[in-house]
Amino acid sequence: MPDYGLPLTFGTFITPSNRQPQAPVELAKLSEQLGYDLVTFQDHPYQPSFLDTWTLMSWVAAQTTRIHIAPNVLSTPMRPPAVTARAAASLDLLSGGRFDLALGAGAFWDAIEAMGARRLTPGQAVDALSEAIDVIKGIWTTDDRSPLVAGGEYYAVRGAKRGPAPAHDIPLWVGAYKPRMLRLTGSKADGWLPSLAYLKPGDLAEGNARIDDAAQGAGRDPREVRRLLNIGGDVTLEQLLALALDDGIATFILAADDPSLMQRFAEEVIPALREQVSAERHTAGTSEATVRPALSLAKRRPGIDYDAMPASLAATAVEPGDLAFAKVRSTYLRGGSPGLVLRPTDVSQVQDALAFARGQNVALAVRSGGHGISGRSTNDGGIVIDLHALNAIEVLDEQARLVRIGPGACWVDVARVLGEHGWALSSGDYGGVGVGGLATAGGIGWLVREHGLTIDHLRAAEIVLADGSSMRVSADEHPELFWAVRGAGANVGIVTAFEFEVDEVGDVGWAQLAFDAADTAGFLERWGAVVEDSPRDLTSFLIMGAKRAGRQHVAQVMAVVNSDDPETIIARLQPLAETAPLLDQSVQLVSYPQLMANVQPGDHDGRGEPIARSGLIGHITPEFAEAAAALLESGEVYFFQIRSVGGAVSDVAPDASAYANRAANFSVVALGSNAERLNTLWDDLLHHFDGLYLSFETDQRDERLEEAFPPATLARLRAMKEQYDPHNVFRDNFNVRPLSI
């Protein structure tokens, strides 16, 4: 058979003997030290002289760091596939993506029957293994949110919950020899794992032919099926070369419990074989293949030239057919389905990603931490440049409290690192938010009234512009661009690093208060007045939901007092406590990192489209309070929040940054489930507002742009776009168009 061109890998096959329980563990650790890619163990749960394979693999995974681990092969009749799928995914997650799965239809049937499994004929064994593969892959397919229905006569699953998803695309190999098993391998498996000792001359060629035919019949590339082979230590280099080039074997697994043999094979045979295979491939013009499964290819979206993707990004890119897609497709609130997620790890890769995206005829979104209330950091069918990997946090100058932070960092991590120095940076109210989006829009956080917006602490930024160039901007370097980054950064480029001057912040008072808000309008007016009259060291946010018939209307008020003095904290909070009947209260002295450690675990899994409206307002007037109460009574708003702003925010001149609406004392946001109805209600409130906070706004009508940016600011931004992004590359956001468009 021809060489399939797959990269060569090597493994060991270790006997899981329980005579000296640590012996197979030490051999596995030695395999890693010697540079093997894989360590495997046979699975005979009915064998009293063997350790249980799952337990052994878990123990080995905990004591290694790099090498992959697999059964060789798993006894499917003894391992229910739904349980196997979850066990495999769990071990893969715990090991950092180092588990591979090899299945067998079962041997030693007398022993298997004695353990309670049903004896199967060869034909039944094929059908049972086929069903097992369907169940296992179905459990792993967490991108499909429907209950799993799979299997049939042998392994019926009816409505099972999917998950967990493995850390990587676990390859599923089959150890089998018979024609029907080989056809099953070609149609459904990711690899074929026979043992050389059980093969006759010509068996590999015949097996490959059956697998290839079945793969092509299933619409697959035969190279999707890796050919693995268990070998003994007596196989010569010449034989191995022939097996690689003539029979397409890409993974050789050495069956040996002898450390000296393992070392000799690793140090002498493997390098020589790699070199000779590479030379033969070069002579034959065979390029090393990276094969994407046909099912993945079928999920590619139009308008993207996937084959032209830069090589620098290929290893980390995620397509719709990849297992990792479920983890990167959506944001906190928005369900996305992009055609490609590029995940650069440095500035040059950001430039590569942007250059590639500019050449495609699809939408472009840029994502930092992925929270994205506005929903603009994902899309449907477009490209997402995901900056998660640019997440470094470093102190540049301890004396000046100057720090450098990557856009992919999350604020919980920033707070933790800064807290080690007794510092903090006001940065929103949730630690799971990414730095990049917030630090280019504004940043209304728990210290805002005393220390201003996040952008007010920005001293410099490194940014990749629409033409792919990278530059540093500050008050002295490209000051006009630095002005735009602070409040409209998403329109002018991709910020790859921020330099902030942070504040000294110790422990703070953290209050959570619940009020009877039956008199909604009166409560809102009183709360607003107290906040405005309070010293700047108090910042307070308020949350309410829709008013429901027959249920008490409760308002949740959170407040931070930037002081570690209990008497000061109580003095600041007492006026708040008197705004309405107090139902519950909690007041704590916490560190700022503790305050920001409110992150919900798991990947963002938003669904549908977020519907949010935003407004900035000077005062909670009686008229606005009555209008807000009516809005809540309508039932159209399930989340209503008012954040205090003002204070230090107003100390900055309106034209000092692109965030110009600095006279407001409050930021108001409402989330609903129906855009048309919420827009109708919100439009009736517009005369109360003077601007909006674009991170909380999803309405795409042109008027919103004029609310976010006063006329002079918008004109200045349009001129900036004309200079730095004349073709409007960064348009799939709260878009400021260039003057010429």
Image (cartoon, grey):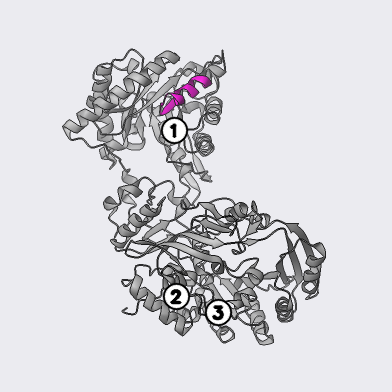
Kindly tell me whether residue 1 is visible in this rendering. no
Give percent across and percent down for residue 278: 24, 30
The residue identified by callout 3 is 653
Q: Secondary structure at mark 3?
A: loop
Residue 224 in sight from this viewpoint:
yes
Give the amino acid type for the residue marked by disc 2 in the picture.
Gln
Horizontal side, residue 628 vs residue 292: left or right: right
Mark linked to residue 514: none
Stretch in magenta: 25-39
Disc on the earlier residue, 2 or 1: 1
Q: Residue tagged by mark 1?
A: 100
Disc 1 is placed on an element classified as: loop
| Residue 488 percent coordinates (x, y) | 46, 71
Residue at position x 45%, y 23% in the image:
31
| Viewer-side label of 2, 3 | 3
Residue receiving disc 2: 700
Residues tagged 2 and 3 counted as in contact (Cβ below 8 A): no
Residue sitting nearer the eye, 716 or 167: 716
Cα–Cα gap, marks 2 and 1: 46 Å
Circle 2 sits in a helix, a strand or a loop, which is it? loop
Q: Dot 1: few (<14), some (14–19), or many (≥20) neighbours within 10 Å?
A: many
Residue 624 pos. (x, y %): 64, 84
Q: Foreground residue, 170 or 600? A: 600
